[in-house]
Amino acid sequence: MKDTLGIVVNFYCSQDTGPAREILVDATSLSLRLLRANADVDDIILVDGSENADSNLKSRCDSINVSYFHFGKKIGYSEAYNIG
């Protein structure tokens, strides 16, 4: 039996719109696609700690079989880490 990894990625952006958020979402999406391409990685979870859920990021996660979680509020790094 081959060992596989489960990965939790924490995401946060203080801006709901704008070029900075778009760059961060693009970079996160690329990172998730690279993780998904690794045969040693099985489960990937993205915890969005931003104040508002991001439907674009969720859609990108769904398209590559990454679980997207947002908890309806802004959460800090340690809380997101513990949730993930």
Image (spheres, helix red, strand yellow):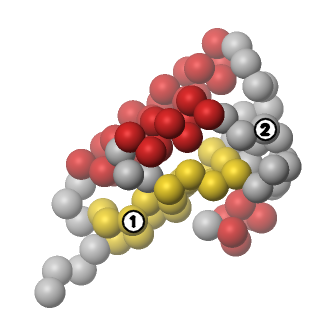
Q: Circle 1 is placed at which residue position?
A: 43
Counting from the top left corner in percent of width and height, residue 7 is at: 45, 63
Classify mark 2: residues with Cα within 10 Å, few (<14), some (14-19) or many (20+).
Answer: some
Q: Amino acid at mark 2?
A: Asn
Q: Which mark is residue 52?
A: 2
Q: Which residue in the rendered view is the most extreme toward the bottom? A: 1
**Secondary structure beneath disc 2?**
loop
Q: Quadrant of the N terminus?
A: bottom left
Horizontal arrangement in the rendering, residue 81 relative to residue 24 (left or right): right
Residue 53 position (above or below residue 79) = above
Q: Which part of the image, by quadrant, shows the C terminus?
A: bottom right
- Residue at the (50%, 36%) spot, across then down: 59
Label 1: few (<14), some or many (≥20) within 10 Å?
A: some
Question: Which residue is painted at 72% across and 34% down in the image?
Answer: 13
Q: Residue furthest top?
A: 19
Given residues 24 and 64, the one toward you in this image is 64
Q: Count the numbered circles shown.
A: 2
How far is the residue under mark 1 from the one under mark 2?
A: 24 Å
Image quadrant in which you'd find residue 22: top right
Is 1 on the left or on the right of 51, as rendered?
A: left
The image's mark for residue 17 is: none
The amino acid on which the numbered mark 1 sits, given as a three-letter code, is Asp
Q: Is residue 52 above or below residue 43?
A: above
Compared to residue 30, the image places residue 77 above or below, namely below
Q: What residue do we see at 17% from left, 80% from top?
A: 2
Q: Dot 1 lies on which element?
A: strand
On the image, the x and y values in percent for residue 41 come to 30, 63
Labels 1 and 2 touching (C-beta < 8 A): no
Q: Is residue 51 above or below residue 75?
A: above
